[in-house]
Image: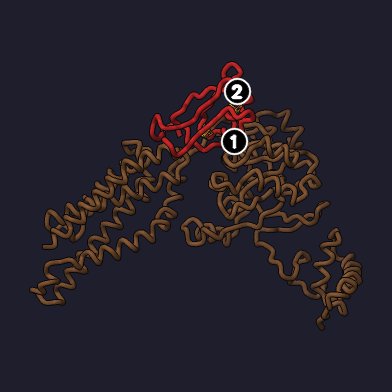
Chain colours: A brown, B red
Amino acid sequence: MLQKYSSSDGLQHIKSEGVAILSSMQGVSQVNFNSDICLSNSLSQDCSSPNNLKKNSSFTKYEKPGYFISHFVERFIDTEVGQIPVVSSKLTFKDRLQTLGARSGITRNNYKVVPGLYAIGMPDENSEVLVTSNFKLTFDILRTALQSDLKADLIVNSSIKSSDSNKNSNKFEKINAWILVLDTLGVNVWCAAGKGTFSTKELVNRVKLCCLEKVVKHRRLILPQLSATGIRAKDVKKECGFSVIYGPIRALDIPSFIVNGRKIVDPDMRQITFNFRERLILTPIELTVGFKAFVFTAAALMFISLINSGLFSLQNGIKAELINTLDRGFISILFLLVGSLSGAVITPALLPFLPFKEFAAKGIIVGAIFSFLALFISPASSLSISAMLALSLFGTAVSSWFAMNFTGATPFTSPSGVEKEMRRFIPIQAGAAFLSLVLWIYSAF
Amino acid sequence: MRNMRYLEHVATLILDKEACIGCSLCTVVCPHQVFQIRDGKAVIVDLDSCMECGACVNNCPVYALKVTPGVG
Ligand code: SF4
Ligand code: SF4
């Protein structure tokens, strides 16, 4: 039986109903109702039969109509400012599947966590507040890192340890903390800081919106070091009273940072890395970003392969010439593929081992090597010299272009340097592509 | 990171030594350890590894740092 409220007397209904539900629930839960929660809970219930609440056991007491509890939320804790979701420190199969989607670029642009305050473990008013972005991958990395087993040998300063965490007997530390998620439009900390969404303004607003001053007694925020590009610590303090402490670069080092009294014990924690794994993990994105250009170029290559002496004179019959055209088209697309993989996957993977500082030059080396290899193991080996030259030039130019694109993904290339590199290498790449085109068409006649 | 370096002599980072108060915040935020504090002032010790991210510029309380990315 549904109640219909008219706007004028609705408030009256809700008020009285809220009381009814409240009294019916007192026996089964310890939820600390404040007026807001009462109101939203009451709207869900048919006030004539409040006992429904007990029968519907498939719903938890946290569920509210119209809301969807994220799968990574384990429970809620009550604070002065309402219920705060406690997130799990373990990744589920769903999380891993989503990670795969985001890494490959399929779901990358819509992989967000609702911004606001979360909890991990059992934080209280003295627990640290960790600030992060609302890119779900970043959020996942943070929540799993915080509850990972921290080895005892990382704890160097035992006096601080005992006062700060008073779990001396424990060999492992689990961190209890608040997580303040900023709205960075689903972009990771570093890129968001660069783009201005992980900003002083957003941080100050979010702190105020979450009434953080009522949740914790202290006035500290721990920010990832890489967010410093978007934050001015002095202004944050001025505008919301919280001082910014820049934590380590990697989430994995946060437990050590907190346990050691918010101190960096190993200078490497402040040093950015770009190891093999970190480079490789970025390559699928490079490929998906380049995919449009790839398809477009492939179509163009097919078209170019139509320019073929045989097709105009039809000396061998239309069928044979069409097959010839297709063959040439596919071979050129094969070299497009070889060039793309050389530039977007192999060059990034081998980055520190390749000569030259310019990525475009590294891409030329890798592209040339793999194009030559491809010449000899593919059907292209039966082509004329000019066709072979055209194909390898093309593969090399494509590789160089993809490799140059990768400068945008690394954490050590300065914009000034990238600009200098582009000014030098774009003409070279364009020249090589053009020469290759001329040779390719020439080889068809 | 020390094995991966980009182009030399392009970083546009400038430090105003007079203005610097030696608070060391730049050494904290810089992900490439471009600065060190010597005799109570910041010193640029590794200019070529600067990636012009602007973290130091943003956080220096006395505006002693400057980068102009993209005009190298
Ligand atoms: S942040 Fe500014 S004032 Fe502080 S040490 Fe660096 S340059 Fe000097
Ligand atoms: S701009 Fe970035 S990389 Fe360069 S010195 Fe400042 S913090 Fe370091």
Tell me what residue is drawn at x 88 percent, y 69 percent: A18
Reading the image, the residue beneath label 1 is B58
Residue A230 screen position, x and y as percent: 59, 42
Residue A420 screen position, x and y as percent: 37, 38
Q: Are marks 1 and 2 on the same chain?
A: yes
Figure disc tally: 2
Q: Amino acid at mark 2?
A: Ala
Tell me what residue is drawn at x 45 percent, y 43 percent: A410
* Quadrant of res A314: bottom left
Q: Is mark 2 within 8 Å of ligand 1?
A: yes
Q: Amino acid at mark 1?
A: Asn
The residue closer to the viewer here, A332 or A431, is A431
Q: Position of A191 compared to A168: left or right?
A: left
* Quadrant of res A379: bottom left
Reading the image, the residue beneath label 2 is B19
Cβ–Cβ below 8 Å for labels 1 and 2?
no
Per the image, label 1 sits on a secondary structure element best described as helix
Which chain's residue wears label 2? B
